[in-house]
Image (cartoon, grey):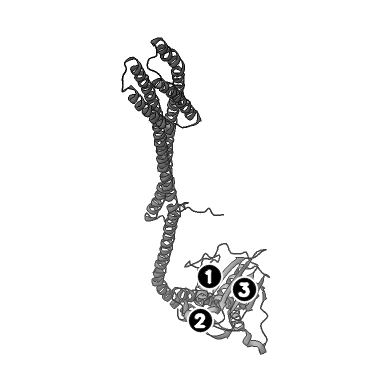
Amino acid sequence: MAKKKTSLKDLLLIHELAFILLIFLVASIGAIGIQLQDQSSQESNRINSLVQEVQQTRGDLYRQLKELFDAYFLDDPEARTEYNQFTLSVENHFQQLQRLAVGEAEKAAIHDLHAGYRAFVAETSTLFDQDSHLNRADLKKILNTDLEAGIFNRYESLLASTEQLLNQKQTELDNQLKNSKHKSNYLLFTPLALAILLLVFSRVFLKRSIVRPIEGVLHATTEISAGNLTHKAPDENIEELASLSKAVNEMADKLLNSQENLIRTEKQAAQGLLVPMLAHNIRNPLASIRATAQVMDDPNNNAETQESIDGIINTVDRLERWTGALLAYLHPLQPQPTYTNMREIVNGALSPLQQKISEKSIQLKLPDWPKASAVRNDQIFTDHHLLEQVIYNLLLNAIDASAKNSPVEIVCRITQDAFDLRLMDRGSGMPFTPDPSAMSAPTTKRFGTGIGIPFAFKVCDALGGSLQFASRLGGGTMITITLPRVLSTHHAIS
């Protein structure tokens, strides 16, 4: 299963999202730290305000006590007024304390302290209403013993308890601030560690996903530009780079095909100039040799002489066919289609091969041709002469490759649109794989030119069909010719 390729855009998006996440994390930690600092600062200010308000109540309480002493010992007429003003001031402080108090413990402490103050005010207010002619001993007892040792000490005890509570809260706040600072330090190292990891990841990511594949593509282009067209660019997991590598490889394949086509064209052009000259120079002496052999052909010749003359004529005819086939292969084919049938084409190809078939005692098996009344069933529209040459060359190869008494089978199957012709032998098989793009093929014959198979490929292509070679189980070769039943005008003029 092919591994799914990742888009470079997706990788860059993940990379950007990682940066955004890191920035968001740093901002969140900073915001949390600022919030904790702000909360701690507000709590500290609140506790300090509570302490100050409590101290204010103590100060005003002492001033009220002073006004009480001034009223009795100094006969100050304004003492009562000032006393009442301090009472209002202390009540305002308690209202402020109740507003600042948070939690049940603070509220309970403020409530007790306020109750103690009210008891003090209730006790001292009655002293202003009593007779001013109390003796000093009774007044001293009331102010020093009863008031100071009783209500005032109780208030001081409540005040100390309240201050202790606030001091404990301040200590807890300081410890909380200290712990928050430690946590903040650890939290600040987290984005730093993540930033280092992201930097390392970015470097590895850029090197493995971008830099190294680009280096591979650059190396491939360098190799291709140097002429090594078989070198392939690496197929990377990044979608865009994989597309680039694929384009470079396709370009190299096209250049390789173009190079092979150019070499083949140059060879064909060189042979196209050389072969006609050689064919002309060969045909003239061949014609003279054949004419001389025909002149010597006399029924009165002995058997040995007649065999030699027949051998000369057959060899000259074979050389003439080779020369004609070579010239036909090197020039463009122009099919001349006519209505014919496969029986006539096959019989025409077999006619010059009868001697070879008899000499090797080949067991020839022909197709089951239609009866004369159904002759139109195997009628086709193609180039009779070119197809006959192809079948002749292929059958000649099959007979030459077969041993004596070997079978050669011809099978023909005609459909409404096409026909298949199969030539099967039990010879030694083909030692090579025929290449339709090659200008010539290897040959196993002693005097073979190697152009019979390429010529067959060329004719089948011109007639709009195909030619295939396959090895048979048990030895031998099967050749399949597939052609349209009616040759189109496009192939006839190409």
Element assignment for label 1: helix
Extreme-bottom residue of the structure: 373
Location of residue 488 with respect to 472 vertically, above or below: below
82 vs 256, left or right, is left
Q: Percent position (x, y) of residue 449?
A: 50, 68
- Which comes before the other along the chain, label 2 or label 3? 3
Q: Percent position (x, y) of residue 88?
A: 37, 29
Location of residue 224 with respect to 427 vertically, above or below: above
Residue depth check, mark 1 versus mark 3: number of the one nearer the observer: 3
Pick the front one: 51 or 314: 51
| Cα separation between marks 2 and 1 | 24 Å
| Cα separation between marks 2 and 3 | 23 Å
Answer whether labels 2 and 1 touch (C-beta < 8 Å).
no
Q: Percent position (x, y) of residue 358?
A: 65, 76
Pick the front one: 418 or 120: 120
Q: Which mark is residue 33?
A: none
Task: Rate crowding at label 2 as few (under 14), some (14 to 19) or many (20 or more) other CA atoms within 10 Å.
Answer: some
> What kind of residue is marked 1?
Ile
> What kind of residue is marked 2?
Ser
**Residue drawn where x is 41% and y is 68% of the image:** 265
Element assignment for label 2: loop
* Residue beneath disc 3: 422
Rendering quarter of residue 481? bottom right
366 vs 263, left or right, is right
Q: Which mark is residue 488?
A: 2
Extreme-top residue of the structure: 137
* Residue beneath disc 1: 453
Answer whether labels 1 and 3 touch (C-beta < 8 Å).
no
- Which comes before the other along the chain, label 2 or label 1? 1
